């Protein structure tokens, strides 16, 4: 029986990854003086956590040692990240708040002031993830020793890939109250640490942590289900769009199918792919950038955020533009404008469209597009980038004077790429003109800003190596998953064969047992028949009693029916009386036959008989309007006063307009009676409908129902 239980655990994935020999991937921080990345540091858990034994060795990411502690020294607890602030112990909330602070700084275009705190949060949540894995193992196999291995996915300078580390795991008890959010927080910590590294121009390190965040999120159940069911997602989207009962706004799946945490996870994965795409695009890895942006689109379509989608489409256009595929770039640029036509996105996209049109020979359209947008730009850096684009176009058209004019303006930009590109083009222009003094000046200018920004360059091969390693790890996980599925299928077949064998083996025993059971069953049936005969006699007696009660109930029902018929007759008489009262109180025909109404309607009939446009009516006087309103109140049971009291925002002219609408006059006829333009009457109608809370087309029906 124990063997079968172990086989079932293996088949359905309940055996921890460490038992199968699979290594848990995490990041070992940079080594400090006196330590080596990958060095093992063992420590003892002084206070046993649930599922662990005091003295047990477990491993996790080894953060930087605290000042005064030698790397590799044994400590009584995990002291590689801050434990106190002003003497107060830290908890998960503290590190979560640091991540939220980093998020707020990033959204407000501010530098990451809490870089060290975010780094500590990253190490903290890395340790929690490993602690959670150890805890799970010890709960299922309390007597089995485990030693998790922590593999470095990419060796840092001075470290060796594949080295393992171990440290203490006596973490705060607050960890137990949020086990489900540890992985998500860990991924966010790596993400914002990568943002901080990007601000510090460590592009390789940023790429490494973006990929780690992506690997963590790819193991999330929600992301796995979305990745494995693309067709199913399309069906859900189509169903939600066609479902008339769905009252969701544009973010259909976000409101209908996912809770807030799921929505944040999907959007977070989309953000990771976006940052990776931008990073690869900046390093001219256009193919990798296109792959990442396409993955971003898959997740953005789920949350259906139009500005986010427009930005991703624009970046896809930039990637195709840089990879010399102008037609694809134009396709995505135009889609971006359809989803977001706001000015910042419009300026950015149309500048790129103008460059493509210029390269394709449509120079007049390109110049017109650039110059028209220059008049509406209010951001200096955007204006300088437009000057740089216009200068390049003039330079390629051999209009050197205009090119010099625009390029000398764009060189004042604070953006390094704009300044450097403009200076190099100015140098080329003056070289063509033979002005070597100016050429030398701009060559020197380019050299100076290049020296300032020299440290911002990265070795592209390192990024490519990081991505290859990530792809290999991902392929290995897929291979292990496929292998696990195959094992599950084989075990199922094996268990099915055992079941069939045992079934046939016990067949003869079951037959003899069935015969004995049948004999016993016959005896029980005979006894039950006798008991049933007795019950039948009792039921016949009860039936006679029930018949008497039924006759009594029938008499009561007959009396109620007669009473009901009487009530119906009285109700019919009341309805007839009510109809008579309604006809007396609200007679619209009398209103139509009133003096002022008859005058208007007869005038319209006369014009129609003479084939004259019925909209050419004479303007009514103020006395006629007042008489019209009074007639409506007299013949229509004070309908105008009731509307005026219920909707006090309506003015006298609005009430006169309502009287004319009750007469079923058109807006053109009403405009003639008011002596104003047709558009003025249309505006008045929209205002009245807005006050009444109805559509423009429903006004006449609404008033008739009131009357």
Image (cartoon, rainbow, N blue to C red):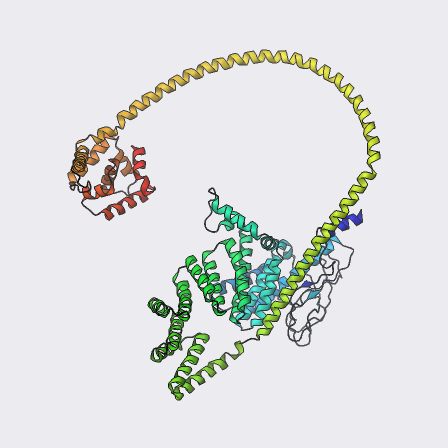
Residue farthest toward the bottom in the current orientation of the protein? 437
Residue at figure coordinates x 19%, y 41% from the top left: 613
Which quarter of the figure has residue 590?
top left
Residue 558 drawn above or below residue 686: above
Position of residue 333 measured from the top left corner of the image (x, y, whole percent): 44, 62
Residue at figure coordinates x 59%, y 62% from the top left: 214
Position of residue 96 measured from the top left corner of the image (x, y, whole percent): 57, 60
511 left or right of 105?
right
Count of picture labels:
0
Position of residue 41 measured from the top left corner of the image (x, y, whole percent): 72, 69
Pick the quarter of the image with the C terminus. Answer: top left
Towards the viewer: 413 or 125: 413
Residue 58 drawn above or below residue 245: below
Residue at figure coordinates x 42%, y 82% from the top left: 428
Q: Is residue 217 visible?
A: yes
Residue farthest toward the front in the current orientation of the protein? 361
676 left or right of 326?
left
Position of residue 109 measured from the top left corner of the image (x, y, whole percent): 47, 66
Q: Is residue 49 visible?
A: no
Residue 438 drawn above or below residue 670: below
468 left or right of 564?
right
Which quarter of the figure has residue 176?
bottom right
Residue 72 drawn above or below residue 437: above
Towards the viewer: 95 or 189: 189
């Amino acid at each position: 029986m124990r063997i079968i239980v172990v086989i079932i655990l293996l088949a359905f994935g309940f055996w921890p990854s460490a038992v199968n020999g699979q290594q848990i991937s995490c990041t070992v921080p940079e080594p400090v003086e006196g330590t080596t990345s990958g060095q093992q540091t063992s420590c003892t858990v002084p206070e046993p956590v649930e599922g662990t034994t005091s003295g047990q060795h477990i491993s996790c990411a080894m953060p930087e040692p605290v000042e005064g502690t030698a790397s590799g020294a044994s400590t009584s607890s995990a002291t590689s990240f801050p434990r106190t602030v002003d003497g107060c112990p830290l908890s998960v909330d503290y590190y979560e708040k640091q991540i939220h602070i980093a998020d707020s700084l990033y959204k407000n275009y501010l530098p990451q002031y809490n870089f060290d705190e975010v780094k500590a949060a990253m190490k903290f949540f890395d340790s929690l993830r490993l602690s959670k894995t150890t805890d799970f193992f010890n709960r299922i196999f309390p007597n089995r020793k485990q030693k998790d291995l922590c593999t470095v996915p990419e060796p840092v300078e001075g470290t060796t890939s594949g080295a393992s580390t171990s440290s203490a795991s006596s973490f705060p008890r607050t960890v137990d109250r949020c086990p489900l959010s540890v992985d998500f927080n860990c991924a966010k910590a790596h993400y914002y640490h990568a943002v901080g590294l990007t601000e510090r121009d460590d592009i390789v390190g940023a790429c490494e942590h973006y990929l780690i965040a992506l690997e963590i999120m790819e193991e999330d159940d929600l992301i796995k289900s979305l990745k494995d069911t693309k067709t199913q997602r399309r069906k859900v989207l189509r169903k939600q769009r066609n479902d008339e009962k769905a009252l969701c706004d544009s973010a259909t799946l976000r409101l209908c199918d996912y809770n807030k945490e799921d929505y944040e996870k999907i959007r977070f994965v989309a953000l990771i792919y976006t940052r990776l795409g931008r990073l690869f695009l900046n390093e001219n890895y256009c193919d990798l950038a296109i792959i990442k942006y396409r993955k971003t689109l898959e997740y953005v379509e789920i949350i259906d955020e139009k500005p986010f989608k427009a930005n991703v489409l624009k970046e896809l256009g930039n990637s195709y533009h840089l990879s010399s595929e102008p037609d694809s770039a134009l396709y995505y640029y135009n889609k971006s404008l359809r989803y977001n036509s706001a000015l910042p996105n419009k300026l950015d996209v149309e500048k790129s469209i103008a460059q493509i049109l210029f390269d394709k020979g449509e120079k007049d359209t390109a110049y017109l597009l650039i110059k028209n947008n220059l008049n509406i730009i209010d951001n200096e850096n955007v204006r300088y980038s437009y000057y740089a684009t216009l200068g390049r176009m003039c330079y390629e058209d051999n209009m050197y004077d205009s090119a010099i004019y625009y390029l000398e303006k764009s060189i004042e930009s604070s953006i390094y790429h704009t300044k450097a590109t403009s200076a190099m083009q100015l140098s080329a222009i003056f070289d063509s003109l033979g002005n070597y003094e100016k050429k030398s000046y701009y060559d020197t200018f380019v050299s100076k800003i290049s020296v300032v920004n020299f440290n911002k360059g990265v070795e592209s091969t390192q990024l490519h190596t990081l991505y290859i390693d990530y792809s290999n790890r991902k392929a290995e996980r897929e291979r292990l998953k496929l292998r696990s599925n195959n094992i599950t299928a084989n075990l199922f077949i094996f268990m099915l064969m055992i079941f069939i064998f045992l079934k046939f083996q016990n067949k003869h025993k079951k037959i003899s047992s069935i015969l004995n059971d049948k004999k016993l069953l016959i005896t029980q049936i005979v006894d039950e028949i006798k008991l049933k005969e007795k019950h039948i006699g009792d039921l016949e007696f009860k039936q006679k009693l029930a018949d008497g009660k039924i006759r009594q109930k029938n008499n009561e029902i007959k009396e109620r029916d007669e009473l009901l018929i009487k009530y119906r007759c009285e109700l019919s008489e009341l309805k007839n009386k009510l109809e008579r009262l309604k006809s007396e109180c609200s007679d619209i025909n009398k209103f139509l036959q009133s003096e002022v109404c008859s005058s208007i309607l007869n005038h319209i009939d006369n014009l129609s008989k003479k084939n004259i446009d019925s909209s050419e009516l004479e303007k009514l006087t103020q006395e006629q309007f007042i008489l019209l309103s009074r007639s409506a109140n007299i013949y229509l049971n004070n309908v105008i006063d009731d509307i005026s009291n219920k909707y006090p925002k309506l003015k006298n002219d609005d009430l006169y307009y309502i009287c004319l609408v009750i007469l079923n006059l058109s807006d053109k006829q009403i405009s003639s009676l008011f002596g104003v333009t047709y558009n003025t009457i249309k505006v008045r109608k929209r205002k009245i409908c807005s006050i009444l809370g109805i559509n423009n087309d429903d006004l006449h029906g609404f008033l008739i129902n009131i009357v």
